[in-house]
Amino acid sequence: MKTIRFLIKLLFPAVCPICGEVCGQNITEDDARICPACEKRVRRVTQPFCMRCGKPLGPGGARSEYCEDCRKHTHAFVQGRAVFVYGGAVARAMHGMKYKNRRDYAAVFAREAYETLGGWIRHIQPQALVPVPLHPRRRRTRGYNQAQLLAAELSGLTGIPVECGLIRRNENTRPQKELNVDERKNNLKNAFQMSKNSVHLMKVLVIDDIYTTGSTADAVAKTLQEAGIEKVYVLSICIGGDDQGGLDYGSKNL
Ligand SMILES: [Zn+2]
Ligand SMILES: [Zn+2]
């Protein structure tokens, strides 16, 4: 089994999703990462960030614990964290992972998430990882759900099981990217539904690729809470910044 894995790695070594080059010198289990040369092309979420949603705070933001959005609205989830600020090279890599069949990027982004947020995950101790389900139509045409790939990789790193079949997206919702902010919220009201009736989980971590307005995370969290799950946390690979007015919502293709 080890030999087969080694051969696969030799033939298809992990590449950096930012520059497309093979990662590192050694073909080992942990060679999947953004290469050091590409660090300057990505923006990581650093302090100060919003204590509720994890968005980096804009100028003067250090004076508040919460971003503008979280000061105005409450969220259904307890806390969210993210690794990268959405935009530029990392946005292109996300696009590749979602639409261009670069499923291999999920391993790199999951490892980045684990290295950045592993301590936080251990602290909150979720009983399961719950990937945000894709719209069924999208799932059929794409053939995979990027959030599910990320959750599976993170599960391998943390040992926390993935609960894929816990929640599903209703067929009759429209893709979010076709809608404005108000329509999105409405569209998401009954967008998710539990697939299992009896849930014995108290605390879960929802996994998504991009956090934009938080409406998807809230809709998922609400559905999970209605099923009796008390605490819902959210981990996203990318997030918009409080200082980033022109978030490219268009590429959040649900
Ligand atoms: Zn690179
Ligand atoms: Zn916030």
Image (cartoon, grey):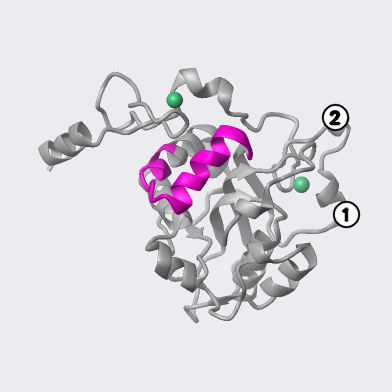
Left or right, residue 24 beside residue 163: left
Task: Name which quarter of the figure residue 162 lies in.
Answer: bottom left
User: N-terminal of the two: label 1 or label 2?
Assistant: 2
Disc 1 vs disc 2: which is toward the camera?
A: 2
The residue singled out by tag 1 in the image is 72
Instruction: Give x and y (percent) for residue 180.
Output: 75, 64
The residue singled out by tag 2 in the image is 59
- SS category of the residue bearing label 1: helix
Instruction: Give x and y (percent) for residue 104.
Output: 36, 43
- Which residue appears at 44% of the width and 34% of the height? 17
- Which residue appears at 44% of the width and 28% of the height? 19
Q: Above or below — where is 15 with respect to 124?
A: above
Instruction: Give x and y (percent) for residue 174.
Output: 62, 73
Kind of residue indicated by mark 2: Pro
Q: Which residues are magenta?
A: 86-108
Q: Above or below — where is 235 with respect to 242?
A: below
Q: How many numbered discs? A: 2
Ligand 1 quarter of the rendering:
top left
- Give the CA separation, mark 1 to mark 2: 18 Å
